[in-house]
């Protein structure tokens, strides 16, 4: 499916489905003989104060092509040769409006802050409780760090090129937004461990996390 849209409608469409204006101009040339075959093309013709009868003249064709190459009108399609999502920041940032700053992405770990004072108290309390365990080196078991805490800081960043297929499902936030996740070191369920439990930072959170519109996190 191909369709021309005015720039004002850019935020209604996934950037991975919009062709680069540079390539879009050549792609629509074949439609000028039958403008009705490309949805939106007749709207572009009217926007240029032309009619379908005169549009095939070369000077009129070039007028329409320039509108597309400037990004005044955009070509939406299922599989663009070069999606606008790859070019928008470097070359076509002026088209983006809100989309330049807000959009699909992922949460990426940028910092971990351990609560030094509280953790010291928790570790001392754990050490007192382990004194009766002869022959074991303190710190060799996860329970020696039970109830210590830390805060993960993650930042909303753009998807990599290899991840662009996730864009349509992704939640959208302002790029650079931060979120803070407070974790506590505790024993919890772990189906991969013998006995079914292990010591981990909880809630368990990956360094890279994907958040989707349906509320699912991965």
Image (cartoon, grey):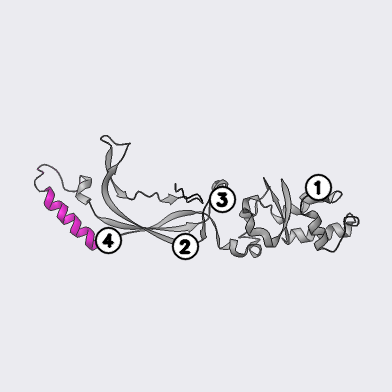
Q: Which residue is mark 4?
A: 115
Dot 2: element: loop
Indicate the secondary structure of the residue bearing disc 1.
Answer: helix
Residue 140, position as x, y percentages in the image: 20, 45
> How far apart in space, not on screen, are marks 3 and 4 (Cα)?
36 Å
Position of the N terminus by quadrant: top right
Q: Residue, x 51% and y 59% (percent of image)?
A: 173
Q: Secondary structure of the magenta portion, mostly?
A: helix
Q: Say whether residue 59 is left or right of residue 91.
A: right
Q: Which residues are magenta?
A: 116-140
Q: What percent of the width, then of the height, locates residue 130?
A: 13, 48
How far is mark 4 from mark 2, CA to CA? Answer: 23 Å
Label 1, label 2: how far apart the Cα atoms are: 43 Å
Residue 137 magenta-highlighted: yes
Residue at image mark 2: 177
Q: Residue furthest top?
A: 194
In space, the residues marked 3 and 2 are separated at their CA atoms by 17 Å
Mark 2 burial class by Cα count in 10 Å: few <14, some 14-19, many 20+: few
Mark nearer the N terminus (3 vs 2): 3
Q: Which residue is mark 3?
A: 167
């Amino acid at each position: 499916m191909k369709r021309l849209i005015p720039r004002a409608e850019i935020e209604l469409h996934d950037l991975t489905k919009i062709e680069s204006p540079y390539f879009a101009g050549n792609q629509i040339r074949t439609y000028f003989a039958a403008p009705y075959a490309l949805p939106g093309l007749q709207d572009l013709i009217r926007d240029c104060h032309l009619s379908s009868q005169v549009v095939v003249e070369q000077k009129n064709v070039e007028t329409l092509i320039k509108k597309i190459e400037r990004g005044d009108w955009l070509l939406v399609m299922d599989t663009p040769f070069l999606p606008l999502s790859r070019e928008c920041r470097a070359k076509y940032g002026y088209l983006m409006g809100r989309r330049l700053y807000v959009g699909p992405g992922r949460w990426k770990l940028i910092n971990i802050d351990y609560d030094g004072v509280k953790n010291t108290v928790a570790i001392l309390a754990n050490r007192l409780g382990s004194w009766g365990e002869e022959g074991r080196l303190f710190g060799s078991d996860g329970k020696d760090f039970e109830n210590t805490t830390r805060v993960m800081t993650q930042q909303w960043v753009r998807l990599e090129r290899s991840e662009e297929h996730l864009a349509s499902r992704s939640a959208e936030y302002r790029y650079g937004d931060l979120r803070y996740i407070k974790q506590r070191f505790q024993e919890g369920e772990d189906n991969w461990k013998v006995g079914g439990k292990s010591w981990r930072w909880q809630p368990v959170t990956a360094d890279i996390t994907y958040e989707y519109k349906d509320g699912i996190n991965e």
